[in-house]
Amino acid sequence: MSTEAGSLSCEGMYSKLIDDSGVQGEEACNARPPVFVSPSTAGKRLAHHGPYRVATACLSAFCLILLLVLVAISVHNKSSAAVGMGQNSQNSSSSPSIQMQKACPNVTSLIAEQNRLEKKNMELVEEIDQLKAKIEKLEATPTPPPVQCTEDWLYFNGSCYFISVFGRSWRDSQKYCKEKGGHLAIIHTAEEQTFLWNLLPRGHWNSYWFGISDEKLEGDWYWVDGTKLVGGFWEDGEPNNHINEDCGYIVKTEVLSRVATKSWYDAPCYMSLPWICEKKAESTSS
Ligand SMILES: [Ca+2]
Ligand SMILES: [Ca+2]
């Protein structure tokens, strides 16, 4: 009985020693007489110390969780910073090269365009110089006064020409032209010959006196201004003086193969033919 009572006393005491120092357990059990602690008293003591323990445990757990959260945030921030720095460093290292790669084609095309524009500019400068030289040459050349022809007279290269629609003898034709201030046409160039030829209408044998004759000496053809004929635009086989033909005329037929530079014939001067007058074009300033 005494042993069981001692055990019970020690159990009650151990319950008490949970709150007190554990060192005192054995000594108290051996040195002091066993003291009975009622369950109500022990419950009061436990109720008195329990909330502190729970609060301490909760506070510790909370602190631990908070510490873990802080550590996690710190680690995350460091990782993000490291990644950001890595990206920045990568961007900073790759951006110039990428930009260079993108910029290089543009630079090449710009250089090519610049070269093209410089070449074009040189051509334009050269053209401007040529135009300036032409302008200086034109300004140095005296401008002929403007000329005009009276009604029914047509202008070509400083002369006015009249083509009649009725016929007269060669001599009367020359008289008509002199009365108008001119003479029968004197034709020195192929251009002048072609100009007059183009004015003439086509016909079976359309014939027009012009200012040439060999009345003074057969075979020696002279213009009405007294100058000797050089060359001429005779048809093949003309002049042939076939029936004492001493005056020259131009023929334009309907044969399209005929040409202006082979259209002169000689005929008797008394024949009645239309004629071509020529006179110097008048200046409008006079
Ligand atoms: Ca003749
Ligand atoms: Ca003839």
Image (cartoon, rainbow, N blue to C red):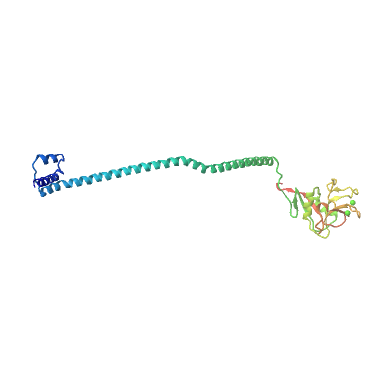
Residue 263 percent across, percent down from the top left: 83, 53
Residue 173 percent across, percent down from the top left: 83, 54
Residue drawn 44% across the image and 41% down it: 90
Q: Quadrant of residue 35?
A: top left
Q: Quadrant of residue 116?
A: top right
Residue 178 percent across, percent down from the top left: 81, 51
Tell me, yes or no, if residue 86 can be seen here: yes
Residue drawn 31% across the image and 42% down it: 71
User: Farthest bottom residue?
Assistant: 204
Q: Nearer the viewer, residue 14 or 57?
A: 14
Residue 234 percent across, percent down from the top left: 85, 51
Q: Is residue 215 left or right of residue 97?
A: right
Total marks shown come to 0
Tell me, yes or no, if residue 181 can be seen here: no
Q: Nearer the viewer, residue 110 or 144?
A: 110
Q: Is residue 219 left or right of residue 186?
A: right
Q: Is residue 113 left or right of residue 70?
A: right
Q: Nearer the viewer, residue 58 or 8?
A: 8
Q: Quadrant of residue 115?
A: top right
